[in-house]
Amino acid sequence: MKRWVYVAIVVAVIALAYMLLAPKDAAEPEDAPQPERQPLVSAQEKTVATVYYATLDGRYLVPLNININSTTEVAKVAVELLLAGAPNDFVADPITVETKLLDLYTIHDTVYANFTASFADIAPEQMPLAVDALLLTLLPLTDGYKLQILIDGQGLQLFDAAIDARDTTQPLSEPLLNPVAEAEAAEDSRPLTYYLGDGQAMYLVPRTIAVPDTLSAEEQARLILSALLNQSGAEGLAGVLWPGTELLGLELQEGVAVCDFSEQLTAYGGGTAFEFMLVNALVYSLCGVEGIDSVQILIEGEQREYLPEGSDISRPLTISAPLNMLY
């Protein structure tokens, strides 16, 4: 009898030790302290917000840089500008203007954006563009965060699985910007962006491809120029180099991309809008490559003073203002 009493005592001691030392269950008590919400603010005050609107045909996103009052809450201001609707007649609303922002905060490495129910009323075929507009407007202002979209405080599946396989009940990462159809971001790849014109010759529209990490700066530059010359991914967009233009040479010289084009580059003969797109598409596209700081345009091997509408190409050109700056 004593033996069985001894065994019972040992079992009870082991059970008590397990209860005290075993890892706690993932489920916390209802009164456990919750992670503290933090406002999404930048380290320094900013006076420009980059907001992603849609092209008029609803196919692509267009980044517009907009002057704002100096603030550290640029993320909130940018989202509110996005929800307020297109600032002019050259871009469209990716998100219905009835949608309102209820809350914006971070917990650990996730941004939570809570919207009114009208966000979920966006047409299924337009929802991926709306979500990407939000992701691209917000996430570049964070340090590798993800975004959890909430509708009246709830995470809902906003996508039709036949259109987009992403799960919006979970935090989402920053997507590729206007990827070409065949673009796939593998682990050993990097995004490479080039710019075409919109249908009104008002703004530059980014297109993104994924390229191997091993490509040199010159190889990346050649891919960009090939895309511009062939107007790759240009369905619904405007080419920025006159048809028939050929690339006669490309050299990288201490951060300068020296691009030699055939005479056909100037065959447009005039038109300030086209020339503006031509110059800026080359500069923004090529200067997006690490190691390229400026672009020197040559024509038939010659360094000319001006293009037909007076753009100075006598020296290397650099990015002088934010892309698609709205003044």
Image (cartoon, rainbow, N blue to C red):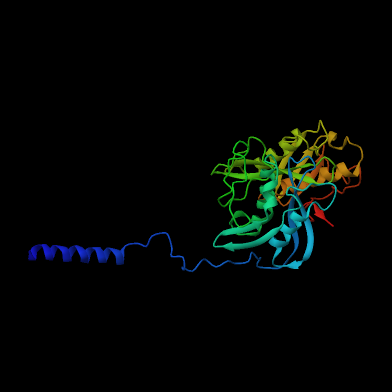
Q: Nearer the viewer, residue 82 or 47?
A: 82
Residue 85: x percent and y percent? Answer: 78, 52
Q: Could you tell me if residue 254 is visible in this image? A: no
Q: Which quadrant of the rendered structure holds the C terminus?
A: bottom right
Residue 197: x percent and y percent? Answer: 80, 42
Q: Quadrant of residue 246?
A: top right
Q: Residue furthest top?
A: 244
Left or right relative to 279: residue 8: left
Left or right relative to 10: residue 308: right
Q: Which quadrant of the rendered structure holds the N terminus?
A: bottom left
Q: Nearer the viewer, residue 184 or 295?
A: 184
Residue 17: x percent and y percent? Answer: 26, 66
Q: Nearer the viewer, residue 284 or 249?
A: 284
Residue 207: x percent and y percent? Answer: 71, 42
Q: Quadrant of residue 181?
A: top right
- Say if 62 sits above or below 78 in the image: above
Left or right relative to 25: residue 211: right
